[in-house]
Image (tube, grey):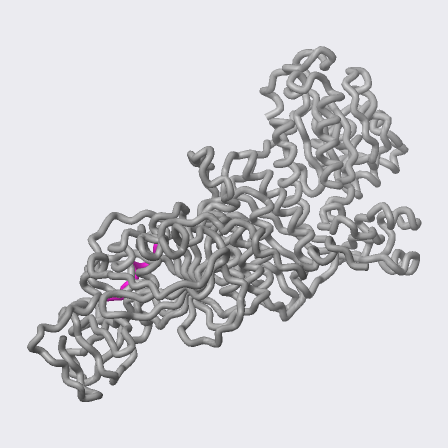
Amino acid sequence: MTNIEQLLQQRRIYRGGQLAPPAAVHPSGFTELDNALGGGLPGSGVCRIQSDTGIGELRLLAPYLRSADGELLVLINPPGALCPDFWAEAGFSCEQLYAVYGDNKQALWSAKQCLQSGCCVSVLLWQRDISVADIKRLQLASTEGRCALWLLQSAGRANQSLPLTLSLALAPTHNGLEVRVTKRKGGWPTGPIQLDWRADWPALVLQPLPANVHPLSQPGRRQRA
Amino acid sequence: MCTRCRNRGGANAPELNTMLWLYIHFPALQLDSLPTAPNETPCPRAIVCERHFTVLQLNTEAEASGLHLGMGMALACSLNRELQVLPFQSNFGPERLREIAHLLYPLSADISIFEPDGLLLKASSMLRYHGGLTPYWQAITAHLNNEGLRHSAATGLRPLSARVVARHGDTCIEDDNHWLQHHWQILPLHAADFASRPLNDLQRLGLKSLAKLCALPRSELADRLDNTSLTYLQKLTGEKPHPVRFFTPPERFGHYRELPCEIETTDALLPPLTVTVQSLQRFLQSRAQVTDALQLTLHLRAQESIVLNIHAGGGEDSAKLWQGLIELKLESLALNAAIYAYTLSANRSFNREQKNQDLFCNQNAELTPAQLLARLQAKLGSEAIKQTLLCNDFRPGVHPGHIKPTQKLTALTPHSLRPSVLLRHPKATAEPLVLVHGPERIVTGWWDQQTLSRDYFVARNRAGRWLWVYKPLSPPDKNWYIHGYFC
């Protein structure tokens, strides 16, 4: 006869009400987002951001990354070289920023080393395909080093079920960003949350056109705002 | 020089104005220094002279099977068919003696190297420090046993008399004055370092022991012996001083080790390397120093040696950490020939700096940033890790040359409105864009062949992505290029 202990050990009983408390959170720098996420972005665990490149995914994380204490910020396989001017202006010191380039296997190995080291603020990893086993391994490393891993993937990937701490889907808007929480450990998916960046990034929002200006609708022609 | 030294001996030291020397003889220096894995079953081994094919050194297993020194290689191999034979390396002995001298240096201040297989220690000046001859000898022999070196040693009032007794094969540690003066004379004539011809002459005279030889008047001997042998005899009896040059410890670490058998996988290299890395740690810790770069040279059979440079950002002395870095470096190495030896050297070392750390913060930090970067560099290569550094240049993506990791730079004002990620190779685009800011004209670099003249714009495409695009000015180009993303 199987007793209840065995079933619990095999993890065949769902214990929704007795979940481990979610990891400590750090304020994200955006009040609307903090309210939706129960205080802020997690300080450890594997989190995912699904978005197109260049809509503001790093600018979303910038206040959070700046506030956390640690020595290094490691970006693994970013889509290009890091431009020091942006990062210096966003308040990061250049000595703490490192970009690491390698193939998929090397990237995962580096991510694990950085997470375990305990001297990183956060680790950002750009990787298209990642398996459940890899995520679990990274989760363990993340808990060990108390450091969060942010997995950046392009939007519209097949939404396989991954054991993530948090998953956000981003979409661009005229004034900033629209964030949907697609998965959260210890919480429910919410959204969309509208972030207004007219104050934070005044140069990178579309100014409303004057009432007497109508954009040309011809496709293939460049337009001037 | 032995003539100018004063005796500062302990309670049971020999008389004043006499010196006590300790000579240590290593009968199987090269064989005992072979790196071994901790749980390896010992097999009989012999070191053989390549010119005369006679056995020069034997390990205990080989001795137990009935082999003895001086026998021919063919005979030795036929008596024991499992015997491993290694060639004698004439330049290994002195090198190894220097390492042993370095090992004994904390115990004894004045050490002299007697090539090829002996060390002379001035015991009289160290007796008071150690509290007598027995504790002094025990400390030394413990160190030598720890290294697995078989040895015989003897004390003497003169360097050469101690050497004669030690090389005869007995370990005699005595400080009784009468014994010291007479014991070496009982030994047979061949125990002394006479060349074979004068030795033969003396034996034909009917002399059996050194005492008989010493009793002869020197003027008589001068007719029969050549100058070298006579001088040797005078030094042995103390009529002439024997000048001694003392060892000074080296400033850099460097160990060359031959492997007992050639290996073709790097895994097999790790156990012997562990021992060498531990001696590196002792070397550095005894000097309160750290090193930031190691050089591991793998000597390959019939191929060029492989030189591996292993770096650790801030400088390290821990054997465990260096071992880890070496393992990572070796993982990615493909061997196409067998390794027969390796050299581990640290070319620069500097004093350890104590870092002030927060007592309560960063309790979970297992590694320092420099250690983490060293580990990543060892595995991925130093090209794979890029630090983002500000540079006094308008050209985007210009890196200010080579800069050591974790080095601070003077503050520079960043250019405003730059993308977070720059593409290595700008790509042409034809998609419709909304130009939000610009143009920002960058025309520079005419002085170093990397001329740049472009009009840069901040643009947004239909999908809502913020791009940094440019249009080249010279040569004029109709295309638009994406150079970066405002991620």
In the rendered image, residue B160, in percent from the top left (x then y), is placed at: 72, 30
At 67% from the left edge and 37% from the top edge, which residue is drawn?
B114
Residue positioned 42% across, 60% down in the render: A124
Residue B484 sits in quarter: bottom left
- Residue at horizontal 23 percent and vertical 74 percent from the top: B460
Residue range (magenta) = B396-403
Q: Looking at this view, name the residue that lies furthest to the front.
A: A17
Q: Where the C terminus of chain B falls, by quadrant?
A: bottom left
Q: Which is nearer the eye, B346 or B266?
A: B266
Residue B94 percent coordinates (x, y): 65, 44
Residue B235 visible in the displayed image: no
Determine the main secondary structure of the stretch shown in magenta.
loop
Q: Is residue A153 left or right of residue A196?
A: right
Residue B399 magenta-highlighted: yes
Residue B129 coordinates in the image, percent (x, y):
64, 18
Q: State the residue in front, B365 or B340.
A: B365
Any magenta on residue A32? no
Which quarter of the figure has residue A50? bottom left
Q: Quadrant of the N terminus of chain B?
A: top right
Please give left or right for residue B178 compared with residue B360 in the image. right
In the picture shown, does residue A138 fall above or below A217?
Answer: above
Placement of A151 over or under B20, stated as above or below:
below
Q: Quadrant of residue B266?
A: bottom right
